[in-house]
Amino acid sequence: MGSGNGRKKSYASIAGLEGSSQTEVRARNVKLYGAKIREARQNAGMTTDELASRLDITRNSILNWESGYSRPDLEYLARTFRILGMNPNDFFDASWIPPVPDARDSKLLDSFHSLHEVGKLYTELFLTSLKEATAQLKRESIASQIREVQSLGRTIGEGSISPKNKAGIVLLRHGAGTENADEVLSITGNFLEPLFHHDDCILIQYVSKLLPGELGVVAHPDGSLVLRQAIFDGRLLPLTSSEVDNLIKEEIVGRVICKVTNDMVPTEEEEQLYRETAEQRAQNTSDRTKSNGN
């Protein structure tokens, strides 16, 4: 069996350790290497003898690593990662190191390397097709969970324009709240607290009549929007004491479905996948139209 340590280096020859005592170097080695290797070995239920046997080195080499008397060479460190299932990025607190293949991946890699060149080529083609098909399924799955709701940039409140609600299409996850939504509106000002807060967005469904108890959005003749509560006799009451029950004619725009919550908003990745799928579908439709025309 080998020692696993390679040629011994003096402490002064190791960059950054010039002037360090042996005790300081041992403490550093334990912190950076020994403690982590011991913890991974114990988590794997492996003794020092078993790990030494797997690495084809002496038990003392393992003990020296874990006690800080020496550090493993890179070759043995990489093999230790594989045997104990350690992630190099976690070990070195980094993010640039490729992950170490586990036992299953290592077996697949060995099988690939044992193939003839033609077999490798067919395998690469198959894996490429499988990867593309999987990515497509992921895009379509996410796209099916997202729907478009229009925003006209309209607000309810004190007249200022909310930067969160610009005119265009808003993407939201499918759900009970978004299923019947026709438009996204935003709240400006704090006059509706605690029910709604400044910059909250709400979903409305276009209706011409509100049922008793429903919260609705109505439009004044000047185009401003306000919230009203429908009661049993058909009247629409203000939500705050600062408002008066206007006698002017108000046109019902729609009923309030719900407030837009964080769980309704897709992530940037989901939005990107949805847009890619939409573009692909549009391109496929265009191609079919051209093909039928020919």
Image: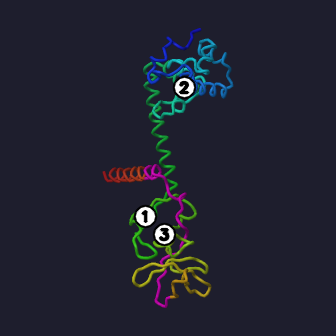
Q: Residue at x 50, y 58 (%)?
A: 265
Q: Which mark is residue 198?
A: 3
Q: As displayed, is residue 227 above or below residue 57?
A: below
Q: Which mark is residue 164?
A: 1
Name the element at disc 3.
loop
Give residue 229's position: percent from left, percent from top: 56, 80
Tell me the CA gap for discs 3 and 1.
11 Å
Coloring scheme of the render?
rainbow
Q: First in sequence: mark 1 or mark 2?
A: 2
Q: Which mark is residue 28?
A: 2
Badge 3 crowding class, 10 Å Cα cut-off, few under 14, some 14 to 19, many 20 or more, is some
Name the element at disc 2.
helix
Tell me the CA gap for discs 1 and 2.
51 Å
Q: As displayed, is residue 120 above or below residue 236?
A: above
Q: Residue at x 61, y 16 (%)?
A: 54
Q: Which residue of the protein is positioned furthest toward the left in this rendering?
A: 294
The amino acid sitting under disc 1 is Lys
The amino acid sitting under disc 3 is His
Badge 1 crowding class, 10 Å Cα cut-off, few under 14, some 14 to 19, many 20 or more, is few
Viewer-nearest residue: 80 or 220: 80
The amino acid sitting under disc 2 is Arg
Over which residues does the magenta segment extend? 246-274
Residue 64 placement, left or right of 132: right
Asked if the residue at tag 1 contacts the one at tag 3, i.e. Cβ–Cβ closer than 8 Å, the answer is no
Q: Residue at x 63, y 13 (%)?
A: 60
Q: Which mark is residue 125?
A: none
Give residue 16's position: percent from left, percent from top: 45, 24
Q: As displayed, is residue 176 above or below residue 141?
A: below
Question: Which one is closest to the eye, mark 3 or mark 2?
Answer: 2
